[in-house]
Image: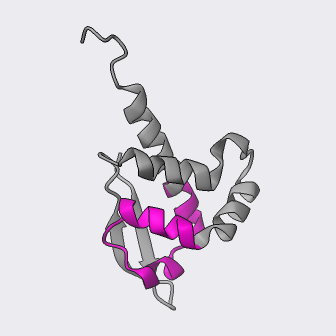
Amino acid sequence: MRLEINVYDENDTIIKTCEAHTIDLEFGTIRSLMKLLNVDNVNDTGELLNIVYGAWEQLVEVLGKCFPDMEADDWEHVKLKELIPAILNILKASFADILSIPKDPKN
């Protein structure tokens, strides 16, 4: 799955596009995202938006591992309508990787 985040200037022009590196996320990164977002208790986008706002610094630190080309100031110029789906897709991709692990110890 290809995930991208766009960085915009003050004229709403894309000045940078960064692609996520989600293929080999460490378990700690996935766990941190799940803990920050408390995905089990999020029922709508409004709740998720409040969580993102409340945990912004921590979230940016974790997302920086997924988007290593993003600089600290870049996060201030990302649109939420792109960020929220990217976060959810990172979690979905991570869960898909986890579910693809063989369960049969003979394999």
Q: Which residue is rendered at x = 48% and y = 77% of the image?
A: 75
Side of 53 where 23 appears, left or right: left
Viewer-closest of 34 and 87: 34
Where is residue 83 shown, x and y percent of the image?
A: 53, 64
Residue sitting at the far left:
107
Q: Quadrant of residue 69?
A: bottom left
Residue 62 included in the magenta stretch of the image: yes
The magenta segment: 57-86
Front one among 67 and 38: 38
Specify whether 32 is left or right of 55: left
Residue 81 image position (x, y, % from top left): 59, 64
User: Measuring 69% from the left and 68% from the top, which residue is drawn there?
Assistant: 54
| Displayed quadrant of residue 96 | top left
Question: What residue do we see at 46% from left, 36% from top?
Answer: 95
Name above or below for residue 41 compared with residue 78: above
Question: Is 64 colored magenta in this rendering?
Answer: yes
What secondary structure characterizes most of the magenta part? helix
Residue 7 position within the rendered picture, expressed as x and y whole percent measured from the top left: 43, 77
